[in-house]
Amino acid sequence: MRRILPLLSSNHAGGRSALTCRYRCGDACFHEVPNTSDNEYAGDVIAGTLSRRSMMRTAAVVTVATAAGGAVIAQSAPSAQAAAVPAAGDARHGGPGGGTAGGARGLRFSPVEPNTADKVTVPAGYTQNVVIRWGEPILRGAPAFDADRQTAKAQAGQFGYNNDFLSLLPLREHGRQVLVANHEYTDEVLMFKGYDAANPTREQVEIAWAAHGLSVVVVQEERKSGRLTPVPRHWLNRRLTATSEFRLTGPAAGSALLRTSADPTGTKVLGTLNNCAGGTTPWGTTLHGEENFNQYFANGTSATDKRYGLTTGATERKWERFDKRFDAAQEPNESHRFGWVVELDPYDPDSTPRKRTALGRFKHEAAEPRLTRDGRPVVYMGDDERFDYFYKFVSSKRMRKGDSRAAREHNLTLLDEGTLYVAKLTGDSPQDIDGTGKLPNDGEFDGSGVWIPLATGDVSHVPGMTAEEVYVFTRLAGDKVGATKMDRPEDVEPSPRTGRVYVALTNNSSRGKSGNPGADEANPRNLNKHGQILELAEHWDDPSSDGFAWRLFLVAGDPEDPATYFAGYPKEKVSPISCPDNVAFDPHGNLWISTDGAQLGSHDGLFGVATTGERRGELKQFLTVPKGAETCGPIIQDRRVLVAVQHPGEVDGATVEKPASEWPDGPGRVVRPSVVAVYRKDGRDIGV
């Protein structure tokens, strides 16, 4: 077993620095939990039900079966097959700790050891390149980056700050692809020399507006390796910022709740903010979740402002001094125009991106689609807040195949009509949950669930709320129908091979504290610092189903901690992992997990884990990121892995003058969030 590093000291939840909490989410974890509803927690629901363990024991290998309505999760449960798992040191498993390049197909690399190196550390035999940095020019006429001479006009033509979600789409140009990136938020103290947080200048604020949003940039592949480089001034390249035009579409568009003095129609919004994870649609567009938008709006006083976490005073960035739309006292509806899923057509640089109101308004960490058997999109979404909810949207329209103008125009309406649901989970073994993370007697944390409909088109399914209110105040709708409170549901990814859906629950250090709920089967640890990953199977493998089976796939942390669980795989053979955040699948069906705020002493990283077969639960670390950074936006292709290295150097006390990191360009250069490509030195496929 490789040894993990000593625990990092931190007074902030999830292992984040105070600087990260301040700029990324407005110190969300240090404010009162916005959800004060009396909804039952998963543990409370479970306590009122009979255990179904006796029904499940006859299906020890399958573990979640017909009792959940016909859904079956995966094929194997290694915990029930201990005799079939080779002993430590078996060549097929690479020995204790997985120290060789053995493993499941796609994961055959030597794991990276936990470390605190100020660089992107990759496995032996692999190399990397920085694809694009904050400030690199992508539009025609944009100047080269100059940290000492930044302007809003220049930034609006340059790659934005703090890249998060990434998507790579095909392009009918030899060796080229279209890279789309979210720019979640700005670290002004790491961007501007002599920054005075109490008195930002208008120019600094306008640069920050331009550094938020989205970038579209064509990239060129080097034929003999996995190296990618940007193609500046390509006609598809695009920047969308906090002042670009967006359209509100769907059933709430035009609602009185969305109208402002600048937009009496309630359909035209300037900007997109705090875009975190997202998704890529089967029809060739990208989805972008607006997450911690609340932190940009000052003087929120209403009950709905409180439920969404708006501050009652001034904001950290003081944008309200320069534009009244960021002052809820002057424009009470402006914040209602954020917190949506944005759909972008990267192939049409003249198109106006659309905020899809049918998908509800909350802190969208992600929006990941799949198709029903008859071709209707289903989008899974998490609300990244302590004790908030997990949702899905089922479209009423079928996708049209092909790339004709008619097909594309039709497909751009798919996310405007359908039904929005919220999840309620029930567990199997309430009497076995004691808050330590100890496995129930039936060997797994598992149970069943139902999807509760909230609204379909202009019809509300929530008593006492109109459909418009459901869409604009979706959190309140979830409160009313008794949705299950979760531990920060973040990124969500359906497996393209099995259809199982994986939900990253990053952490919740408030669970079990005075005044907060204790552990339950879906969230089995009090003071949960390390998080877990939930695996969900829709009834009959139908994404439009109204029910599902679930179980915890991973319970993260130090493998030597009895509270951890790796789908039953021998824990001496896995890498330590903490705080799962973004998730993605590789071409072999393995789940890849990036982390945010890891609490095991190592820097954050990217991990691959097998989801099926006898190696199910075999988890191996592929890379680590520099000091202060978070791993975001993973894309795993045959020949390369892409990650967004977000907020490098974001360490308490760091400034431009006193940087905590020298990445990516070395001493004397400003720290710059960047996208990195990793590939094999021999040019062969990843992990095979």
Image (cartoon, rainbow, N blue to C red):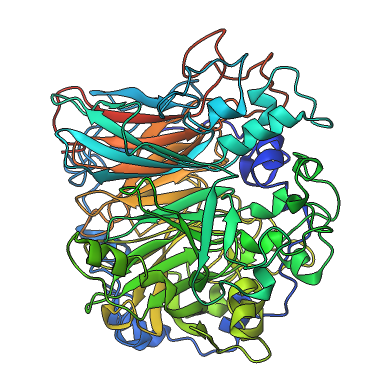
Q: Quadrant of the N terminus?
A: top left
Going 32% across and 82% down the picture, which residue do you hit?
539
Q: Nearer the viewer, residue 665 or 610?
A: 665
Q: Residue 54 in the image: x percent, y percent? A: 39, 86
Instruction: Say which quarter of the image contains residue 614.
Output: bottom left
**582 shown above or below 238:** below
User: 269 left or right of 78?
Assistant: right
Instruction: Say which quarter of the image contains residue 80.
Output: bottom left
User: 487 left or right of 380?
Assistant: right
Q: Residue 361 in the image: x percent, y percent? A: 58, 67
User: 87 left or right of 319?
Assistant: left
**259 shown above or below 197:** below
Going 73% across and 47% down the picture, which residue do you hit?
27
User: 98 left or right of 332?
Assistant: left
**674 shown above or below 657:** below
Going 43% across and 31% down the picture, which residue do you hit?
624
Q: Residue 505 in the image: x percent, y percent? A: 52, 58
The residue at the far top in this view is 668
